[in-house]
Image (spheres, rainbow, N blue to C red):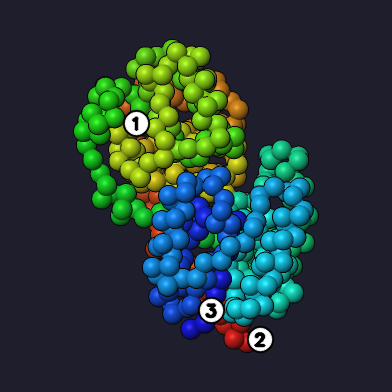
Amino acid sequence: MGKMLMLASVPSMIGAFNMDNIALLMDKGYEIHVACDFKDRSVWSDEKVKDLILELKKRGISCHQIDFTRSVSNLKRHRKAYGQTRALLKKEQFDFIHCHAPIASIIARYAAHKENCKVIYTCHGFHFYQGAPIQNWIFYPIEKYFSGYTDILVTINDGDYQIAKNRFHAKKVVKIPGVGLDNEAVHNRFIPKEEKRRELGIPKDAFVILSVGNLYHVKNQDVIIKAVAKIHDKGIYYLIAGEGEKKEEYQKMIHGYGMEDRIRLIGFRDDISELCYASDVFAHPSKREGLGMAPLEAMAAGLPILTSNVGGINSYSVSGKTGYKYAPDDVWGFAHGIQKLKNHPGLRKKMGKYNIKVAKEFDISVARRKMSEVYDMIQADADGM
């Protein structure tokens, strides 16, 4: 078919969000190359990065090191990454590139413009949105300017789609349901609640809240820790799956509340669906979110959700129907939501049934179909150059 480049800032963006796109492109017959900062360890460990590289090479995919940085002010690294990206485009003569992550995508789009290469840019959530902190809007004019170097701009929530379509300059703007949720896989991982709780060492009659996400400031898990602490109910347990820079801070906070037995940092997990089936409620209080696949997975497993009211979360989180949502810093609001759901099991069941239906709207089959159409569009444009 042709040759394309999948580009992102860090390996986790490739491994966690683009392996299905890569499989789709392989089915279409493309020669695929991947570029990112494979040296980055801010999200993934050495072992996970090595496993990703081995998997890519096993599939016959060429890997390229680009020294991206997510630090806005590191201009020296940005210049180096731009030079590396442009040299790669010049050497390989790709039909198109598909880029991800704001800074890496700015560099890639400018390099592609200079080398006359077609570009798809997937925005995984603009930093600016209604209700965002004023400082986040500094990214607005930058994204608007570089949208002029974008052939297809892919958005994953309603708010971003409207901004891109009505205010930006990309040749085409489309919306897809994120990377898509494999509802069938979630249902196939069903496990009886009591069985999983025995494995986790949690009482069968406990009320269990689950959060999944990197332990970073933006994921905001500390607001749920504080909410649980305010309730003073020894029957409430809170599991946080993920790793990140806030781990030590959260451990100290939990120790300070004297709740090490009930609030647990359980690290990176590959059994998220099973954890959902062991839980009663899913909490996702993120300060910024393009869409949020973790809450959707919980919804597919039949859990009510407690979320913040920002960004792409609003595409599916409806207070009173899917669960409850609050401002990201509303500790008392989240505490009230936890208590209400704990005290009304019938309401939890009703919301859970509703959420199973909602999750199907974000199924991976929908995402695959729409991304297939995007790849066909960009190839048609490349062939017409």
Out of 269 and 202, give the one closest to the viewer.
269
Q: Is residue 125 above or below residue 222?
A: below
Amino acid identity at mark 1: Asp
Amino acid identity at mark 2: Met
Out of 184 and 80, give the one closest to the viewer.
80
Tell me where residue 224 appears, x and y as whole percent: 50, 26
Q: Residues within 10 Å of mark 2 (few under 14, many from 20)?
A: few
Q: Residue at x 34, y 53 (%)?
A: 183
Give me the C-alpha separation between circle 3 and circle 2: 15 Å
Image quadrant holding the C terminus, namely bottom right
Judging by the rendered image, the residue that carries numbered circle 2 is 385
Tell me where residue 302 appears, x and y as whole percent: 33, 41
Judging by the rendered image, the residue that carries numbered circle 1 is 280
Q: Residues within 10 Å of mark 1 (few under 14, many from 20)?
A: many
Can residue 373 be seen at all in this image of the molecule?
A: no
**Residue 203 figure quarter:** top left
Give me the C-alpha separation between circle 1 and circle 2: 54 Å
Amino acid identity at mark 3: Lys
- The image's mark for residue 3 is 3
Question: Disc 3 on helix, strand or loop?
Answer: strand
Q: Earlier in the sequence, mark 1 or mark 3?
A: 3
Q: Is mark 3 in CB contact (under 8 Å) with mark 2?
A: no
Looking at the image, is mark 1 or mark 2 nearer the viewer?
2
Side (left or right) of 269 relative to 231: left
Question: Disc 2 on helix, strand or loop?
Answer: loop
- The image's mark for residue 108 is none
Q: Residue at x 63, y 87 (%)?
A: 384
Q: Residue at x 72, y 43 (%)?
A: 136
Q: Residue at x 35, y 27 (%)?
A: 208
